[in-house]
Structures are given as C-alpha cells and as structure tokens.
Image (spheres, grey):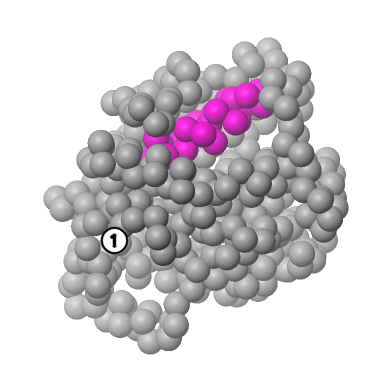
Amino acid sequence: MQVFATPGNPMPANPTVSAVRTRDGVRLRVARWHGAGPDRSRGTVLLALGRSEFIEGWFEIVRGLVERGFEVVAFDWRGQGQSDRQIAARHRGHVSGFSAYQRDLLAVEAQILRVFCPKPWFAFGHSMGAAILLDQAHRGASPFERLVLTAPMIDVALRHRAAKRLVIRLLDLAGFGRRFIPGGSERPRFTRGFGGNLLTADPRRYARLSEVVMRLPELAVGSPTVSWLSGAFDLMERFRDPRFAAETVVPTLILAAGDDRIVDTAATEHFALHLRAGRCITIPGARHQLVMERDDILAQMWAAFDAFIPGEAAAPRTVQPARPPAGRLRRLADHLSASALGPRPATRS
C-alpha cells in the first residue's frame, strides 16, 4: 500500500505506510508521519476521517500537525480510500453496521499506536469519524487523552427526518441494504462542481480535492448504501439521549460549522451542553468540511486546537501559531487552555 501525491496536493515528507488487519479480516491502509523525534515529541494525533474520505485529502492537516511537533497517524476506514471494500461494488459507501468501525479503531490502536507511537495520544475526528470516536469514548474504550471533533455527525440536516429513517429501516429489513440510498449514485463528492457545493467556501481547496479524485478515482466512493445510513441513524438516535453526552468523560473540543447544511449544528450545540468535560465552539461562516475551509476559518480552528491540545513535554514550536480570532471566539479559545475542561456541564457558545 502507498499514499499518493498529485501536482496540486504535495505529500508531507517521509510517510510510513502499512496495512493492518482487523479481527474480522478487513485490511486497512494506515500512514504515519514523524514529528520532532521520540525524545522531543508532543505526542501522537490520530486522524479519524469522515465518510467517503481518504488519507490524501488530509495532507494539509497532517503537515500542520507535524510542524507542531506531533506524530500523526491517518487511516482509511473500511469501505473507502485504499482499504478493503465490504461489497464488490467499490463505489458504494457501505458497511453492514457501525459497530464494524469500532473494530477498525481497535486494529489501528493495537497494531500501530501501541507499537510505534509516543504518548500522549490525541484524536482529531471529522463528521462520521468524530461520531465514531464519541461512540468509542462513551463505551469507555477510548485510549485518547483528548478529542478534537469538527462538524461531528450528531444529527443530519434533513427535513422529515423521522419518516426518512423509517423508510431506510424498512428498506434495510427488506434486503436492500447493499443498494444505494434513494437518489444515490456512484458519483463522488468533489466532482460535482464548486458552485452550490455544501462542503467548503474555498475554491482552491475544493479544486485540489477534485484533482485528487479525478487522478485517483479508485480512492473515492459515491453515495452511501441503505445499510450505512441505517447504521448512521441508529448511532445518531443514541446521541439524542442526554445521558450519552453526560456519560462521556473524555475531554472533548467540538468545532461546529456555522453554515453547515449536512450535519445539524443546532443538534451539535445541544449535545455539547450535556458533556461533562467538553465545549462546543461554532465558527461562523464555515461549511461542513471545516478542515479544508478558507484560511481565516482554518486559523480559528488551529487557534482552538493549539489552546486545547497541550503536549506533556512540548517541543519547541516549528510553526508560527495562527493569530487568535478576535472577540468572542478568542475568549473561548483562551478558555480552553490547559485545565479549562473540568468535569462540569458545558455551556453553549
């Protein structure tokens, strides 16, 4: 296995690429990057990507983390990127149930983190990946000291949600789990044109990912299957119970997108109110793919990350810290520093 550079998407230097096998025999692609060295490392950050994403789409974030002195581990979930597909139709985003993703996390932890990666361990998850990390933390199985979650899939921005969930459940029970959801297709994201896209307001970063998908179509998947969406609905239903957040004790920073029309930002903010050791910052103007948004939005994301993720033996910084955002967001970022996340209820930002 390998990771791929394209002309507009240079690869961070010197990755170590390997494959791990889950306990049910699924092969996952994993890439590691070294930070400042084992005696100066600030720890390790695991990247848990969103649905349909792949390692190459996160090169910019990897570079930012390595420059900050962290080791970085990124992997493709089963069914996407260069990891094994669950069905013969490669371009259908499919799993039979979300519990399978927990097996992916366990395999990466056992075969990569515990063998090669210095502590402390942190996780940075986006959308679906963020939801899976929350599920792991709620189960009491998280090996991470802190979580940073961007646009987590707490709920989806859907009209007539209850009726659509019922239809998906009935289709799954009727044996259509491997089919595309109604209206779905093999066409991947980032091939549908920048105008009207719901992912990012940055045309340069959108074009960069479009080029990757066009040059490396084998990495991409299209719409999810009925079983995938049924599993997602089941997990999101659990998030609706206030006890879920209250029972999740891993310190967590949620960065919500103020202009998100894929996941429901209001539901995310409400969820964060019940976290015992968490906060939610909503970044105005950001669309769903917050990690590839405009420079001013990414600067706010990095300012919050830098305040929240300290290393135990921090190496000298090799990157200039982003200018803290002004006003309300700057005060919130300052509030997250060091021990700001004590075991008390979160307040809505």
Q: Position of residue 173 (x, y in %)?
A: 24, 76
Task: Name the quarter where the C terminus is drawn.
Answer: bottom right
Q: Position of residue 104 (x, y in %)?
A: 40, 43
> Depth check: 273 or 184 in front?
184
Disc 1 designates what residue? 223
Q: Is residue 105 visible?
A: no
Q: Residues within 10 Å of mark 1 (few under 14, many from 20)?
A: many
Tell me what residue is drawn at x 62 percent, y 13 percent.
Answer: 37
Tell me what residue is drawn at x 31 percent, y 57 percent.
Answer: 192
Tell me what residue is drawn at x 60 percent, y 68 percent.
Answer: 265
> Depth check: 129 or 282 in front?
282
For residue 120, above or below residue 242: above
Query: In the rendered image, which quarter is residue 71 located in?
Result: top right
Query: In the rendered image, which quarter is residue 338 located in?
Result: top right
Q: Secondary structure at mark 1?
A: loop
Residue extending farthest to the left is 88
> Depth check: 63 or 43 in front?
63
Q: Is residue 240 visible?
A: yes
Q: Amino acid at mark 1?
A: Ser
Is 111 part of what is drawn in magenta?
Answer: no
> Depth check: 75 or 318 in front?
318
Q: Position of residue 133 (x, y in %)?
A: 54, 51
Total tally of numbered discs in the picture: 1
Q: Provide the residue span drawn in magenta.
A: 54-79
Is residue 275 toward the left or the right of residue 124 in the image?
Answer: right
Tell me what residue is drawn at x 51 percent, y 62 percent.
Answer: 153
For residue 66, above or below residue 201: above
Query: In the rendered image, which quarter is residue 274 located in?
Result: bottom right
Is 68 part of what is drawn in magenta?
Answer: yes
Is residue 159 toward the left or the right of residue 298 in the image?
Answer: left
Task: Name the quarter where the N terminus is drawn.
Answer: top left
